[in-house]
Each structure stands twice: as structure tokens, then as C-alpha cells.
Image: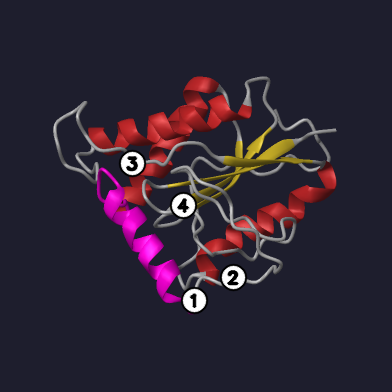
Amino acid sequence: MIVGYHCIFSTYGFWLPNDPRGSWSEFVASWNLFYAGGSVTKLGTRRSVAAARLNAQEIQRRTSTKNALMHKPVTLTGIQARAVGMGFAIGCQVKGYRIHACAIMPQHVHLFVGRTATDIRTVVGDFKRFATMELCRQNLHPAQHGWPERAPVWARGSWCVYLHADDVQRVIEYINGNPLRDGLPPQHWGCVKPWPGGNHSAG
């Protein structure tokens, strides 16, 4: 029985085509995500290879892709991340969604969203929209241009894994551990609700 979803989505310009990066994920051998088009580079390792030395051709390809972006890549500051978390909380209030774990990183977000009747891609789109609205409300939008001509905050699409009851603890620990693995302090978000124990109908 599906009890929720582990959703990952990035800020604009973070994941690039054929970017040779993996993750620490315990349930995906490598999530080499990007949302600007192209094809995924498969990696046969569970370890991050973000720091691996790139050859000249790879460097040139990555540089060309970044230069081709219409806007600057977005990296969230701590204050902007706080606004994003507030936007997620508003989304939960308005739409009735439940978030059971959340990590808002400078260039991507991890969410454990409880089961819902709404398509999870729509749910992620709602969270992006409410987060962007809150950034605008607080005058914290990265582009700092006039609405609606602002550059996007988020890359297109998302990556979502359907979760069963025996996945829950592992996923919560993984998401909560993301800031620590990047040398950041633990995160505590008001939008996060405790997992309801033995109740596996999270939505």
C-alpha cells in the first residue's frame, strides 16, 4: 500500500544534462537528476561523485549548458529557504497536503509527502507555486525583477518515489540527514507534521 512519496525537485539551473553526479540515496543507485532536457547519465555507484575530476570535454559541455541558460542558476540563501518553508506550510493549509519530512537545500528540495488523492506531480507544482508566491510576498525572489517577468525559481519537473510503510523511517532519516551531510545545521520546519505512527494512510 502506498503511504506517501519522496519528492525531489531543484532550483533553476542546478541539474544539467549529463551532469555526472549521484547521491547518498539508499533506495536509488544514482539519482542524476536534471530538468533542462537531455538524457540521464547512469552511474553504477551509491556514492556521490560530484567532486570527481571532469575531463576537458565534460567541462566544456557543462559550461556550454550553463551559458545557454536564459537566467542565472538559483541558489537559495537561508532567508529565502525560510520563505520557501513558509510557502510549503501555506500550501499544506490551503490544499490539505501533509509533509512528514522536509529538507530545503540551497539548490534542491527533499519532501516526504503523505498519500493524497491528487496526482503527486500536481502536488509538487502546488508547493513550487506557493513557495514562489511567498518569496515574492517577502521581496526575496532571487531575480528581483517585476512580476510576472521574473526568472523562474524552480527547474521544471520533479523526481518522486512511491513509498510503502517499511520505507518511511529510512526516508525520514535520509531527508533529515541531507543538511548534515552538506555541513549545514539541522532543519526544523513548521510545515512538517509527525508521521502518524501505525497509521499508514498518510493522506
Residue 101 x %, y %: 60, 48
Q: Amino acid at mark 3?
A: Val
**Residue at image mark 3:** 153
User: Residue 108 got which mark?
Assistant: 4
In terms of sequence position, does the residue under pointer 3 or pointer 2 come before the other?
2
Range drawn in magenta: 53-75
Q: Which quarter shows the N terminus?
A: top right
Q: Nearer the viewer, mark 3 or mark 2?
A: 2
In the drawing, does residue 112 fall left or right of residue 20?
A: right
Label 2, label 1: how many angstroms apart (C-alpha)? 8 Å
User: Residue 48 got which mark?
Assistant: 2
Query: Is residue 169 at least partly visible in the picture?
Result: yes
> Within the magenta stretch, is there residue 57?
yes
Are the residues at dot 2 and dot 1 in contact (C-beta closer than 8 Å)?
A: yes
In terms of sequence position, does the residue under pointer 3 or pointer 4 come before the other?
4
Number of numbered discs overlaid on the protein picture:
4
Residue 117 x %, y %: 68, 20
At label 4, counting other C-alpha atoms closer than 10 Å, the crowd grade (few under 14, some 14-19, many 20 or more) is some
Q: Dot 1: what SS?
A: loop
